[in-house]
Amino acid sequence: MEEKVFFNDGSGNRVCGILSNPANNKNNLVVVLVHGFNSKKNSNTNIALIKIFSKQNISSLRIDLFGHGESEGKFEELTLSKAISGIESAINYLKINGYKRIGLVGSSFGGLAAITVAAKSNDLVFLALKCPVSSYSEFTEYTDTDLIYNWRKQGYSYREGKKLNYSFYEDIKNNIAYNVADKIKVPTLIVHGDADKDVPVEQSIKLSRLIPNCRLTIIKGAGHRFSEGDSKEEMLTEIVNFIVKNSQFL
C-alpha cells in the first residue's frame, strides 16, 4: 500500500513524500529515502529499492527535497540547509505516526544532507549512503575564484542546467561532511563506484575513516549512476543486505 503524504519543514514549506507500508510489515522499520541534486522521490534507485523492500516487509518514505518534484520551493532557492530541514521533518512525521525505528538512505547531494542529519539526530538506527558528496569545496566549480566572483556578482549561476542562487554556495561551503562525521553513532554503509566522475571515490574513502562504525564498499567500474554492467544490482544488493542485517538487531 502506498500513500502520498504532506508535511511542513522547519520554515513552513510543504514537503511531499510517498509512504510505502507493506500490509504484512511486522518489524515497524521504516527507511527514509533521499534523492540527489535535480532528481526526485521516484528516482530509479528509490523505485528499485522499494520494490525490494516490499518483499522484505520494510516500510519506506521517499521524499522530494525543497524545490524538487511536488515539494514546495523554487529550485533556484535551494540550499543544503533546506534539504536538511526536509529530511528532519520527514523523520519527525514518522515519529508522530508511531514509527520508532527509522533508517536513512541518501544519494549524492542528498547523501551530504543525510550525513548532516545523522550527525545531529538520536532518532536513527542506521545510515546508508550512495556516492555521497562529502565536500563541495573540493570541486572546481566551487573553488574557482573567477566562477565564484561571477556567481556572487550576478546573484545566480547554473548547475546541471538549473538556475541556482548564490545563497547555495554560501550555505554549502559551511557544510562539510568530514567535520561532523565523528558524531555519527549509528552503523553506516557507503557504496561508491571507483569510476565516478561526478563525486570522486576518494571523498568516500576519507569519510569512511572518520565515521566510527562505517563500512565502505567500492564497486569497480561503476560511475555516479551505477549504469555500467551489473553495478546497479551490486549497489542495490549492498544497501538492502546492510539494512536487513542491521534491522535484525533492533
Image (spheres, helix red, strand yellow):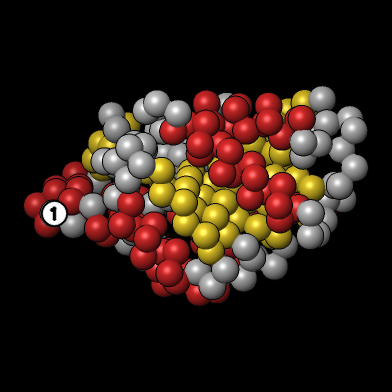
> Taking 186 as reference, is 85 above or below it?
above
Residue drawn where x is 62% and y is 33% of the image: 49
In the image, taking residue 56 as reference, residue 44 lies left or right, namely: left
On the image, the x and y values in percent for residue 210 come to: 44, 71
Q: Amino acid at mark 1?
A: Asp
Residue drawn where x is 53% and y is 64% of the image: 214
On the image, the x and y values in percent for residue 43 come to: 53, 28
**Helix, strand, or loop for circle 1?**
loop
Query: Is any atom of residue 28 visible in this view?
Result: yes
Location of the N terminus (image quadrant): top right
In the image, taking residue 19 as reference, residue 104 lies left or right, namely: left
Q: Residue extending furthest left? A: 146
On the image, the x and y values in percent for residue 6 come to: 71, 36
Q: Quadrant of residue 223?
A: top left
Residue closer to the observer: 93 or 74: 93
On the image, the x and y values in percent for residue 245 come to: 71, 52
Q: Residues within 10 Å of mark 1 (few under 14, many from 20)?
A: few
Q: Quadrant of residue 37?
A: top left
> Taking 48 as reference, is 245 above or below it?
below
Question: Circle 1 is placed at which residue position?
Answer: 144
Residue drawn where x is 86% and y is 47% of the image: 27
Residue drawn where x is 64% and y is 42% of the image: 240
Location of the C terminus (image quadrant): bottom right
Residue closer to the observer: 158 or 215: 215
Query: Is any atom of residue 40 visible in this view?
Result: no
Residue closer to the observer: 57 or 8: 57
